Amino acid sequence: MADLNKLTLADARDALKKGETTSVELTEACLKAIDAADALNAFVHKTPEIAMERARAADARLAEGDAPAMCGLPIGIKDLFCTRGVPSQAASGILEGFRPEYESTVSQNLIDAGAVMLGKLNMDEFAMGSSNETSVYGNAVNPWRRGNDEAALTPGGSSGGSASAVAADLCLAATGTDTGGSIRQPAAFTGIVGIKPTYGRCSRWGIIAFASSLDQAGPMTKTVRDAAIMLEAMCSSDAKDSTSTDLPVPNFEALLTGDIRGKKIGIPREYRIDGTPEEIEKIWSDGAAMLKDAGAEIVDISLPHTKYALPAYYVIAPAEASSNLARYDGVRYGHRAKLAQGDGITEMYEKTRAEGFGDEVQRRVMIGTYVLSAGFYDAYYNRARKVRTLIKKDFEDAFAQGVDAILTPATPSSAFGLGEMAEADPVQMYLNDVFTVTVNLAGLPGISVPAGLDKQGLPLGLQLIGKPWDEGDLLNIAASLEKSAGFVAKPAQWW
Amino acid sequence: MSIDENTAARVAKLARIKVEDDALPALAADFNRILGFIEQLNEVDVEGVEPMTSVTPMRLKRREDQVTDGHQQAQVLANAPDAREGFFAVPKVVE
């Protein structure tokens, strides 16, 4: 079979079961593609020995007829996941040299499902960023370009390496994590599918923490069917994460019936934002028309507190980050600064954190410290948590009216150039998450589906937001949208 | 609410991040832009609204209070920048 690295998870799985190829062949094809794609800077720690060992083990299981759901399928893992014995540093200098003695629950679930890890993927430092430009490894690069323009574009962030790797067929799929849009925005920028499940679906244990009340892992894949397959493998109830749900994990793939007749799809009027490009408005209304043609009912809804989601997020996420990142003190793991004569422990903390954290991480830790400090806790942090309650209630009210899912654009623009935002103030970069961040604040599942190309030839995505714990229904609606949109474009290979 | 350089220096100290004096004006300016953006929250009527403590209505799980793990000193210390005689080593803390 030709171009094995370009297969979807579903097609590769079926080919393996029929004996048309082997996991070793699939894995070798991906490793070759990875080695030829250093210009994308997507894989930052390659693990070919681990990959080949797991591929051979998978082939043995396939031969015995004992193949679990993702047996032999080669994937990439975001650097935020702790993987035993393999560098896991959240793209931060402060975790330089850290090799965990343990495996995150999600990556262990994938190992148990037979998946083959090819290596670790680039990302924004501690998942803080929307362009992959805050990484200690340097920028990940989008395989898509504006026509013949050679300017390097961002793959989005924070899961930029994951998005770039899947879009460029370096792996069949990848893990991502999403705190404010970090799966869905990069998926939209690279023409792939990304789902953030309901908060609590995937265990957070062993995923380096950013904002614990918002962080969720999810798959980044070439198709909605692949997202269903991989999400099921990633989810589990986990005693090591007290916020992980005990609800059974459905067979999501079996729920892809293609029938969405009678589904009620909400179009939130507050997501029409001044300055959104006309092309995005158009793709949004085209998406609604496609769902309507497939038998869904389109209704206008209101989510009145939408405007306050980003400011609430930029209180809550930095507050939680300042607490979570307090553990990087130069004592137990990672970087420790060289000390001068007479320096004590306070100087060690301060120098270690100044050297180890990049600018954006330092900024967010300090903002978080400020909003939690005496005298400001009520004015900022408690107020933001109250607004969060109202944002969640907006969605509950919409679902109570019978809405099954909500359709919105995934991002306010297509991929922008690396370095283009360098002079902008931090708030400009934060606006990238305007359509996605509400979903994290409300704990809901959200999926980005590629829907078309803009006039520069870059992918645009649409977001569907589902009811809590109803990823099955959400994936089914997304599959219908995917089928109608018929997005098949791939980036021309220049790397 | 405007953040001056003294406040920026105090926050950096609280966060245990060393910021050189000449970097304080730019840091204070960044804080002011971000906090200016956050100020929008003051427009929202939050009278009588409970602050969110858990995004999913769930009771945190409980477990038996018993030892489930341990005796992993070597693994715990394996990534330490400085470990000696089975302990983490740090500069002198108490005079």
Image (cartoon, coloured by chain):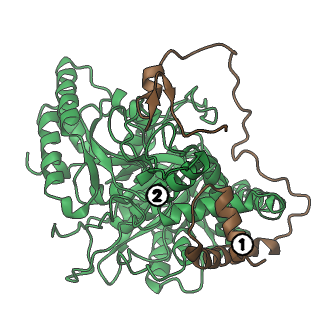
Chain colours: A green, B brown
Q: In this picture, is A395 found above or below A453? A: above
- Seen at 46% across and 51% down, the residue is A337
Check the picture and name the quadrant holding the N terminus of chain B: bottom right
What is the x, y in percent for residue A409? 50, 70
> As rendered, which of A134 and A290 lies closer to the eye?
A134
- Rounded to the nearest angstrom, the CA distance separating label 2 from label 1 is 22 Å
- Residue A144 visible in rendering: yes
The kind of residue tagged 1 is Asn
Residue that mark 1 sits on: B6
Tell me whether marks 2 and 1 sit on the same chain: no
What is the x, y in percent for residue A183? 45, 56
Which subunit holds the residue at mark 1? B
> As rendered, which of A217 and A222 lies closer to the eye?
A217
What is the x, y in percent for residue A351? 52, 55
- Seen at 17% across and 38% down, the residue is A15
Question: Residue B48 bears which disc, if any?
Answer: none
Which subunit holds the residue at mark 2? A
Under circle 2, the secondary element is helix
* Left or right placement of residue A113 versus residue A336 in this view: left
The kind of residue tagged 2 is Glu
- Seen at 71% across and 64% down, the residue is B10
Residue that mark 2 sits on: A355
- Residue A183 visible in rendering: no
Check the picture and name the quadrant holding the C terminus of chain B: top right
